[in-house]
Amino acid sequence: MSSLYQQRIRLLATEMYKLYYKQGPTYLHSLITRKGYTVARNGKAVEQPLCKTSRYGLNSIRYQGAKLWNSLGENFKDAVMLNNFKNLIRVYEELVVGACPAGVLLGFKSRNRAGQSMTSIPS
């Protein structure tokens, strides 16, 4: 069973996949801007906008979605179909969450109930 945080990350990753491959509604396609394909390390990256405020910047889908998408490995981004991408995310989540009680998913730090970042497994 996954936490609400993990479900939100999975949903955001899925929405970013749809936006990147233009599978969602056309009015949402302008939310992301692809970087040029000249970037050797991360060929399918999206631009992460500069933010001045938390409310309309750091917490926006443009910023958080780009951050998440750019942190994914190429094997996720190269998934041929949406269902393949979802399966990759689900399998990866099960492996990471099962191996680490701190619940680190897709490179994001999990938080305990008090909202404090958990970077290591409590003993």
Image (cartoon, rainbow, N blue to C red):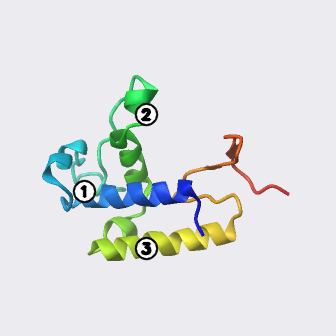
Q: Are marks 1 and 2 in contact (CB under 8 Å)?
A: no
Q: Secondary structure at mark 2?
A: helix
Q: Which residue is mark 2?
A: 58
Q: Is residue 38 above or below residue 18?
A: above
Identify residue type, mark 2: Leu
- Report the amino acid beneath label 3: Leu
* Image position, residue 25 (x, y; %): 17, 55
The x and y percentages for residue 44 are 29, 57
Q: Residues within 10 Å of mark 3 (few under 14, many from 20)?
A: some
Where is residue 79 drawn, in percent x and y?
A: 31, 72
Q: Position of residue 87 (x, y in %)?
A: 42, 76
Quarter of the picture containing the C terminus is: bottom right
Quadrant (top left, top right, bottom left, bottom right) of the N terminus: bottom right
Q: Earlier in the sequence, mark 2 or mark 3?
A: 2
| Residue type marked 1 | Tyr
Q: Is residue 65 left or right of residue 80?
A: right
Local SS, label 3: helix
> Which is nearer the N-term, disc 3 or disc 1?
1
In the image, is residue 75 above or below residue 58? below
The residue singled out by tag 1 in the image is 20
Asked where in the image residue 10 lies, by quadrant, the reply is bottom left
Using the image, determine if residue 108 lies above or below residue 115. below
| Rendering quarter of residue 75 | bottom left
Q: Which residue is mark 3?
A: 88
User: Residue shown at 35%/30% (left/top)?
Assistant: 50
Q: CA distance from mark 1 to mark 2?
A: 20 Å
